[in-house]
Image (spheres, grey):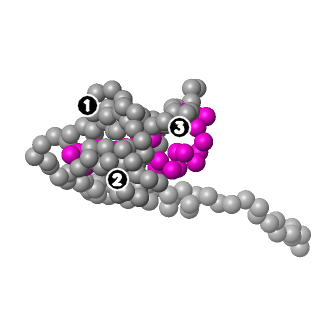
Amino acid sequence: MNRRPRRFMNQINVVPYIDVMLVLLIIFMVTAPLVNPGQIELPSVGQSLKPPMAPLEVEIRTDNSLRLRDRAQSNAERKVTLDELVDAVKEQQQRNPEQAVVISADKNVRYEMVLNVMDKLQSNQVKKVGLLAKPRAG
């Protein structure tokens, strides 16, 4: 008997995988239109939203002098001391509680002076205190 030795099959039969894939594809194609996408219902408001109010700007110059500018009313600035600054800002925020306060300082001003002003404002319950910076070009 001249029998040849059995050859090993070294290939994968992918036909059953393709059949399963096509069945899954058909199932997804049939069920996809039946699924409702999530929709949200937005609440409505009685009046349009007001634009944000322009902030109060505290300017610290290189000689450590303070200037206060109310951008909401005019761009006129006035020189103030630290205590006058707190009183003026608190008075302004009593009239307009939503008005923010920004601190702008010359880049050569000591960081400690900026922190002193910010700490004084925050310790006197002045809300919405931030720092103003110029964006870098490019």
Between disc 2 and disc 3, whose residue precedes? 3
Magenta residues, start to end: 95-118
Quadrant containing the N terminus in the rendered view: bottom right
Q: Which mark is residue 64?
A: 3
Q: Are marks 2 and 1 in contact (CB under 8 Å)?
A: no
**Mark 3 residue type:** Asn
The numbered mark, 3 or 1, whose residue comes first in the sequence reads 3
Asked if one can make out residue 6 in the rendered structure from this viewpoint, the answer is yes
Determine the residue positioned at 52% across, 33% down: 61
Q: Amino acid at mark 2?
A: Lys
Which residue lies at the image location 53% right of the left edge and 37% below the top edge? Answer: 64
Viewer-nearest of discs 3 and 1: 3
Q: Which residue is mark 2?
A: 127
Alpha carbon distance from label 2 to label 3: 23 Å
Crowding near the residue tagged with mark 2, few <14, some 14–19, many ≥20 C-alpha atoms within 10 Å: some
Q: Residue at x 32, y 32 (%)?
A: 71
Q: Nearer the viewer, residue 33 or 116?
A: 116
